[in-house]
Image (tube, grey):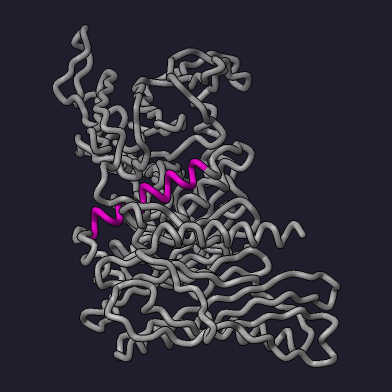
Amino acid sequence: MKKRCAVLLAAAMLLSAAGCAQDSKRPEPTESTEPAASAVSETSAENVEATEETPQKPQPSRRFDDSRIATLYDVEFSYTDPNGNKDTYFYEVPQIDDDTEGAKNINEMIGYRFGYLVERAEDARSRNDFIDTSYIIWISTWTGPVLSLQITSVDTMYNRDVGAYHYNFETGKELSNIEMLEYLGYTDNDLTLKALQRAVAQHFDTYYGGDPTYASELCKMRAQSLNGLSDVFTYFAVYPYYTGGLIVTVPMYTPAGAGMMWTDIDVYPDKRQASGQILHGQDEWFTCDVTATGEVTVRALTDYVTPDGAMTYQTMKEWYELGDKTEFAVSGCYGNYIKMLMTSIGQDYAPYVFLLTENGNVEYIDVISGAQCGTMVNGGPLFGINGIVRLETGTAYDAEYGAEYTTVYGVSRDNEKFNLMEAVWNTAPLSIPSMVGSFVSEEPGTWFEICEDQPNFYTGAYTNGQRIPATWDSNISYLGMDDRGWICSVSLFRMDSGRTQRETLAMMPDDYGGVSVMHIGGKSLLNLPQQEAVWFEMTQE
């Protein structure tokens, strides 16, 4: 009974949205379209209480409303499965009532994708077997002569499949995602993609960012959810929202145990994509600025000299082995930022930027590490730290080293304080079990290994299934994440030159025991091609 209530409630909510979205509702059945009772075999009569509707095709109309939508299936029945569980199943599968090739193509796709599920369910029911599709429903929106259909199927494990189809009754043409976006006025694909990335990140942070126990795993799932969103222009279901904007159904990776779930995301490409506030932060050698539209930039103060005249920027640059770049557009900034604190933490010079979002989350930027490799990226939210209203500096005690260090605290409305640097260290995703191990790839002829202890990274050549031992010890550090994956810096200290070589990588772990790695900048230590991802397989060696 609980399952039936949940299913009917979900269906009612979607159909309610359809009522808001449609220019006119579907016509009520007339005498000629009343459903007839389905014939039930004697062997299954005691298990089935069935009522099937087979409405007739609507009469042709010149109006641009739902009278132009026909019905392929409109079925509802109660059924008791072999385990004795009784439930109600209902399937509504629409068709476009037009005789053009465009309409025919869409109808065939709908029939193949969703009509098949109805046929499969009816076959299982006839054999007194288990039915795996709970319901299929649809909603419609009209934008002038253009009809948009969103069809959703939900199986008995609550997995969703969503399809969106667009048809112009004036031209008789099917519209692709790109054509539909252009028809709606969203002609800037880059702007649309950025709005979708921001919306996906904020959705993930709001619904899944509250548990610090699995902070590293959440970093992996957030990166997976942000990756590949450019499919909005080809593959994803895109549906115009009745209040403006779009509903885009994207693959969202969640900690709920279900892996990937198709999730509806509200996207408004034509609205302001940030808090509108202008923020500025500065420490001794760097500044950070946030624009009203959410762009974040870090700049080096190359003209600064310490008050005693002992150190210039050039001296500091050589000391910390910074790159030549002095201005950095920070990638991966998807939040609506309202406050900033920029300061040095620890016992040495290590500047960090902490950004407070409208919903009380905290994000961070590791400035020195970014300046060393020439890539500045947002570290993402500190999972488990929520409801923060202000940021402040302070000190904390490190029991392992028996010393105090400078840190930043996030303070909640209840005046509870969270050590943000401790959260930064605990969030580092490279320590999760799926990333600790050895990875090989024949394409570049390279292997690498990530370890829990320092030095935590080794790399070398891989030929004929054999790993050639690394010549030098090296380290890998996590900088942050954006749509390319985790952005990491590999540093290799060469004893022969006394200098450190660095390579910046984008790493996207998968769920099949491997990771895609792409060279972004610096010295090519892993022998990777330029701007092309290479898959590395995890081995048991």
**Magenta span includes 296:** no
Name the residue rendered at 73%, 74% in the picture.
78
> Up-down: is 361 above or below 202?
above
Q: Locate the C terminus by quadrant.
A: bottom right
Q: Quadrant of the N terminus?
A: bottom right
How far across and down, in percent of the image, does residue 9 sit? 62, 57
Residue at 48% x, 71% y: name it: 151
How far across and how far down the image is residue 35, in percent?
60, 83
Could one spot residue 317 in this view of the protein?
A: no
Q: Above or below — where is 6 with respect to 500?
A: below
Q: Residue furthest front?
A: 31
Range shown magenta: 189-206
Residue 60 higher or lower than 92, as above or below: below
Seen in the image, is 257 located left or right of residue 407? right
User: Which residue occupies 52% across, 87% down?
Assistant: 32
Residue 487 pos. (x, y %): 39, 48
Judge by depth and name the residue closer to the eye, 139 or 406: 139
Task: Determine whether, in the image, residue 116 is placed left or right of residue 177.
Answer: right
Q: Residue at x 25, y 72 (%)?
A: 145
Residue reaching furthest to the left: 303
Compared across the picture, whether 511 is left or right of 126 comes to left
Residue 193 is inside the magenta segment: yes
Dominant secondary structure of the residues highlighted in magenta in the image: helix
Q: Position of residue 231 (x, y in %)?
A: 36, 66
239 relative to 389, above or below? below
Place residue 324 in its image quadrant.
top left
Q: Quadrant of residue 118?
A: bottom right
Q: In which quarter of the view is residue 501 placed?
A: top left
